[in-house]
Image: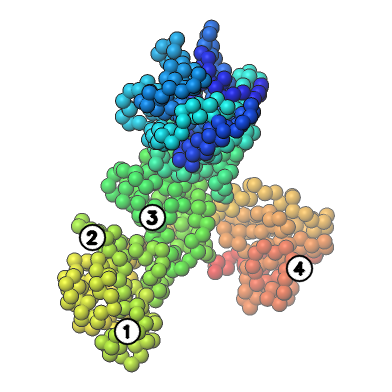
């Protein structure tokens, strides 16, 4: 690698061509960067010094296409500066031409700018431009340099930059701008194709300009080391297809690459946004090995990207499927990994019919909405959904998906019908993020003539105004303040309307009869309202229960065979047991001898799974029933039994509730047994058998 200070004009002058490789991003500078460059040019021109103004670095490597008298370079870093200076020089040339500018001996002319900085005038065809950009950027820049009509489509950013500089050139002397450009200095970095790693050099640079996205860095990493011909083919055949799928949603492309890695590596921890590239680089070698090379990896990425892209905004597809995907996306964009896995089962494995796919998406929507209504934890959804995706069986996707939803416990459980119904009728729903979505679906679910709910807002039938009008007070009765406090934001008092400001806090009868009032409303949710002669707690309660009943129909409950859940629990524990060795659990020689005897006795009781924990050994069938805690001279057994139910004729059991703390215990149990001698094992095993046969709570 050679690095020297060099005037920009010396870099670009001569019979040479700089090419922006296909793996680089499109032109992306905007007005802030254009203004900064313009200010740098003005500053350089006005400083009375032979020293130039430092602009940054331009890093490039030989393309492999070198001919006598003509050199061609691939730009590794600095394309935004090169492109913007070329646009500025084009704008300057056109300004000089159109204004018939005649400057000093060292001033700009059309011929000088063309021959020195824009074109290789002695070359033709593809060799003539001094700078070759990528895709539509190049067509646009070449049209401006050649003075031709703009192509369709064209690069809006390049045209905007050109027009920006044309306007500024009206305010300054062309001689000044030309002198300033001539004083710009760059660090000229030439890489040795055989000795330097362009990607490592690229990563180490502290360049000015707009930071590359994680996807930009990954694209560079994947393609940069390839010969130019392979770069172009791989880009056009694979990577460009991925970029096209996410065009207009570039940030989601970063998310796709993060989630692609998670699906491939079965990760359950979400990679930080600014660490996606480094994580990808660390796994890329294993991806290539799995897919038999770079091309296989890129082919796999394109396939997965197609399923992933079906979940992003703006995707079009099958009507019913698109609606179902949109519903889930509105509620839980973090479900992308899970939806991608289900899409693979539908599209590639053919193990999930369209009907089953829609059923899966309906359950996913129901899970998220029910939890939001019930006020349950909505954080860490990415981890939850990605974990479920890893456990979806490609041969039985719907069944395994239902089982995995049912296995989510505690804070991430699937709410029951009763829990959902109670939350709908008793919780304050107004102000929840999903309130508008809830009423949209209550209004339109199952209808072939949906109402335009996007034009509506949430209306409180009983007004929000704390000082209710006299008519409302009389209607609600002497406890109107309490009634208002209880029912104001509940489901029964909320509806949709396009006349929110018109209704205001009018009396109920006026809300019904004014133009556009409830009596004239085409909103289906308002049918019950217009049929009522008064609006009190009784009517709000009736309407709330009716809407809750409809909601339970729209967002179905989860029905799963308990035997399937039990089998899945058993499978997971078996897998966990194979990954851990009880030999690694620390024990003294004495307790190891006792443990070996006890272990054989317990495993002989039936289909028992033995799992080594960090400082104990647990037993499951598949539910937990025993934990063995080694001590220096004995084993402490913790059993899943109620002390009042234990069969202990030898009276060796203790009530775990009497213990403030059981050292190293991972599980909860009600009975403690000490095993310090082999003679104690038979009595202990009787109680272990009782714990094994006790139904799980």
Residue toward you, 506 or 479: 506
Q: Work out how far the residue at label 3 is from the one at label 4, CA to CA, in angstroms.
A: 55 Å
Mark 1 or 2, nearer chain start: 2
| Quarter the N terminus occupies | top right
Q: Is residue 267 above or below residue 463?
A: above
4 or 1: mark nearer the eye: 1
Secondary structure beneath label 4: strand
Residue at 34% x, 63% y is 436
Mark 3 or 2, nearer chain start: 3
Query: Which quadrant of the figure has residue 695?
Result: bottom right
Residue at 63% x, 50% y is 577
Residue on which disc 1 sits:
468
4 or 2: mark nearer the eye: 2
Q: Work out how far the residue at label 3 is from the one at label 2, CA to CA, in angstroms.
A: 18 Å
**Can residue 308 be seen at all in this image of the molecule?**
no
Residue at 72% x, 68% y is 662
Q: Residues within 10 Å of mark 2 (few under 14, many from 20)?
A: some
Q: Residues within 10 Å of mark 4 (few under 14, many from 20)?
A: some
Q: Is residue 12 above or below residue 155?
A: above
Residue 674, label in figure: 4
**Can residue 36 be seen at all in this image of the molecule?**
yes
Secondary structure beneath label 1: loop
Residue on which disc 3 sits:
330
Residue toward you, 382 or 199: 199
Mark 3 or 4, nearer chain start: 3
Q: Is residue 207 above or below residue 505?
A: above
Q: Residues within 10 Å of mark 1 (few under 14, many from 20)?
A: some
> In the figure, is residue 679 to the left or right of 258?
right
Residue on which disc 2 sits:
451
> In the figure, is residue 148 to the left or right of 609?
left
Mark 4 or 1, nearer chain start: 1
Residue 196, label in figure: none
């Amino acid at each position: 690698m050679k690095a020297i200070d060099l005037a920009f004009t010396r870099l670009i002058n001569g019979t040479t061509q700089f090419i922006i490789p296909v793996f680089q991003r499109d032109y992306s500078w905007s007005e802030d960067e254009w203004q900064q460059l313009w200010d740098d040019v003005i500053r350089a021109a006005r400083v009375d010094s032979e020293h130039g103004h430092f602009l940054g670095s331009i890093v490039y490597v030989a393309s492999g296409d070198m001919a006598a008298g003509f050199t061609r370079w691939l730009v590794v870093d600095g394309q935004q500066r090169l492109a913007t200076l070329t646009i500025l020089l084009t704008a300057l040339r056109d300004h000089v031409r159109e204004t018939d500018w005649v400057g000093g001996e060292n001033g700009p002319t059309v011929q000088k700018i063309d021959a020195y900085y824009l074109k290789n005038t002695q070359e033709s065809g593809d060799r003539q431009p001094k700078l070759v950009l990528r895709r539509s950027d190049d067509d646009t820049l070449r049209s401006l340099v050649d003075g031709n009509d703009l192509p369709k489509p064209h690069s809006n950013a390049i045209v905007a930059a050109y027009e920006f500089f044309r306007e500024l050139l009206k305010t300054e002397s062309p001689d000044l701008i030309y002198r300033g450009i001539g004083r710009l200095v760059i660090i000229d970095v030439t890489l040795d194709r055989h000795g330097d790693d362009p990607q490592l050099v690229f990563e180490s640079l502290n360049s000015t300009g707009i930071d590359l996205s994680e996807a930009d860095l990954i694209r560079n990493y994947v393609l940069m080391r390839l010969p130019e011909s392979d770069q172009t083919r791989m880009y056009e055949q694979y990577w460009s297809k991925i970029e096209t799928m996410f065009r207009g949603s570039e940030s989601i492309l970063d998310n796709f690459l993060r989630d692609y890695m998670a699906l491939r590596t079965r990760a359950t921890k979400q990679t930080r946004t600014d660490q996606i590239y480094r994580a990808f680089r660390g796994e890329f070698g294993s991806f290539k090995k799995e897919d038999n090379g770079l091309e296989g990896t890129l082919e796999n990425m394109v396939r997965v990207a197609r399923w992933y892209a079906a979940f992003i905004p703006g995707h079009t597809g099958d009507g019913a499927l698109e609606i179902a995907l949109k519903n889930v996306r509105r509620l839980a964009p973090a479900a992308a990994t899970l939806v991608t896995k289900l899409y693979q089962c539908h599209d590639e494995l053919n193990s999930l019919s369209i009907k089953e796919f829609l059923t899966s998406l309906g359950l996913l929507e129901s899970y998220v909405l029910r939890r939001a209504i019930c006020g349950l934890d909505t954080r860490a959804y990415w981890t939850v959904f990605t974990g479920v995706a890893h456990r979806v069986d490609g041969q039985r996707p719907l069944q395994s998906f239902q089982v995995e939803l049912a296995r989510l416990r505690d804070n991430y459980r699937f709410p029951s019908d009763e829990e959902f119904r109670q939350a709908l009728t008793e919780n304050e729903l107004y102000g929840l993020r999903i309130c508008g979505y809830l009423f949209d679906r209550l209004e339109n679910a199952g209808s072939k003539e949906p109402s335009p709910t996007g034009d509506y807002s949430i209306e409180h039938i009983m007004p929000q105004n704390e000082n209710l009008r006299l008519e409302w007070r009389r209607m609600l009765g002497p406890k109107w303040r309490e009634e208002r406090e209880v029912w104001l934001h509940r489901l029964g008092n909320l509806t949709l309307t396009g006349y929110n400001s018109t209704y205001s806090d009018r009396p109920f009868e006026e809300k019904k009869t004014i133009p556009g009032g409830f009596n004239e409303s085409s909103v289906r949710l308002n049918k019950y309202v217009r049929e009522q002669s008064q609006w009190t707690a009784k009517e709000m309660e009736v309407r709330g229960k009716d809407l809750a009943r409809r909601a339970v129909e729209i967002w179905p409950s989860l029905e799963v065979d308990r035997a399937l859940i039990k089998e899945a629990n058993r499978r997971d524990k078996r897998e966990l047991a194979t990954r851990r060795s009880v030999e690694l659990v620390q024990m003294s020689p004495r307790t190891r001898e006792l443990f070996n005897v006890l272990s054989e006795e317990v495993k002989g009781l039936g289909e028992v799974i033995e799992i080594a924990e960090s400082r104990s050994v647990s037993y499951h069938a598949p539910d937990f029933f025993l934990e063995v805690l080694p001590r220096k001279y004995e084993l402490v057994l913790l059993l899943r039994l109620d002390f009042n139910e234990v069969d202990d004729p030898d009276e060796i059991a203790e009530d775990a509730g009497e213990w403030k703390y059981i050292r190293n215990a991972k599980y909860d149990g009600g009975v403690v047994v000490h095993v310090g001698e082999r003679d104690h094992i038979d009595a202990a095993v009787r109680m272990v058998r009782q714990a094994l046969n006790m139904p799980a709570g």
